[in-house]
Image (cartoon, grey):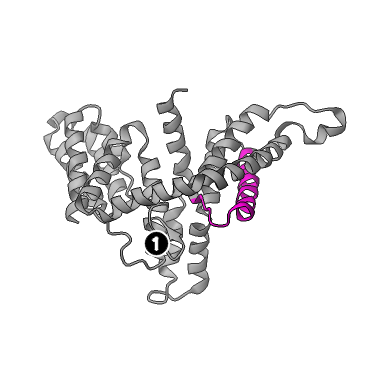
Amino acid sequence: MNILGYFQKLGNALMFPIAVLPVAGMLLRFGQPDLLNIPFMAAGGQAVFDNLALLFAMGVAGGFSKDNSAAAAIAACVGYFIMTSALKTLNADVDPGVAGGIIIGLCAGHLYNRFNGIKLPEFLGFFAGKRFVPIITGLVALIIAYIFSLVWPPVQEMINHLGQWILTSGKPGEFAYGLANRLLIPIGLHHILNTMVWFVFGDYHGATGEISRFFAGDPNAGQILSGFFPVVMFGLPSAALAFYVTAKKENKKVVGGMLLSVALTAFLTGITEPIEFMFMFLAPGLYLIHAILMGVSLVVA
């Protein structure tokens, strides 16, 4: 597998845990005192955001295991607990967050593929096969924790500076994020960028990333993401309408239902890939204009 294919697979693996977030966000928001004032509902939603790194570790491990095995996800869970606990002892200031969860997930997935059929001496037979994967993942997690304690502080500082540039440089950062976000969709790498912006960049009372900081009450969070809504809810559905209007008369019945479904998907769920993949390869120039307009939307929103 080449590097591009590897990152595409990582992007797909991240989609599963990300799919949980809309429900968690609704629980957290509707449970707030200014809405329904149901504390246990808000706490349920907050629990998901508090454990994003663990969810990402399990999702990536399952996505990279050759048979989407639950054993790989359990191994990632074990590895994540060991890594975070060891880090607290080695360097309490180090918090790799979501990035650490993704790395543990990658290790667990690859270790599962390598050791799920391992044979051990008869007296250790109980620990052979898939049962060996959480064990080896836990040992590797100790090594990862030690490496993180040494190299992560400068990396964490660099990530924070990059995030601060995107979030505080004003219009250039907003435009660059919107443009890159769309241009990475054809190769499946936009999820990586989104993960960093949504869950890593910026800090507000311990909450990191645009989404977590927004729900933590950061008054400056969420602004950079607001520019997506005009394009996702109105721009792309309008594009679908334009495709229908300009379609040949004999093809309108064929394409009408499909265009309606992808337009509703974008408007109701924010999932834009179905409509974007309809024209990104057929009309790459049009897709480039779409990406530029997304950057412009983030600037003017």
Residue 257 visible in this rendered orientation of the protein: no
Quadrant holding the C terminus: bottom left
Magenta residues span: 72-97
96 in the magenta segment: yes
Out of 147 and 28, give the one closest to the viewer: 147
SS label for mark 1: helix
| Residue with the mark numbered 1 | 213
Q: Amino acid at mark 1?
A: Arg
Residue 254: % across, % down: 23, 32
Task: Please say if 5 is above or below 171.
Answer: above
Nearest the camera: 226 or 162? 162
Vertical relation: 2 (above or below) 236: above
In-image side of 78 versus 245 (left or right): right
Image quarter of residue 213? bottom left
The verdict on residue 251 being magenta is: no
Circle 1 residues within 10 Å: few <14, some 14–19, many ≥20: many
- In the image, what residue occupies the spot 32% across and 39% down? 273
Asked whether residue 53 is in view, the answer is yes
Percent of width and height locating residue 86? 64, 51
In terms of image quadrants, where is residue 108?
Answer: top right
Question: Residue 230 at what x, y percent from top left?
Answer: 21, 53
Kindly identify the residue that appears in the image at 56 percent across and 47 percent down: 149
The kind of secondary structure the magenta stretch mainly shows is helix
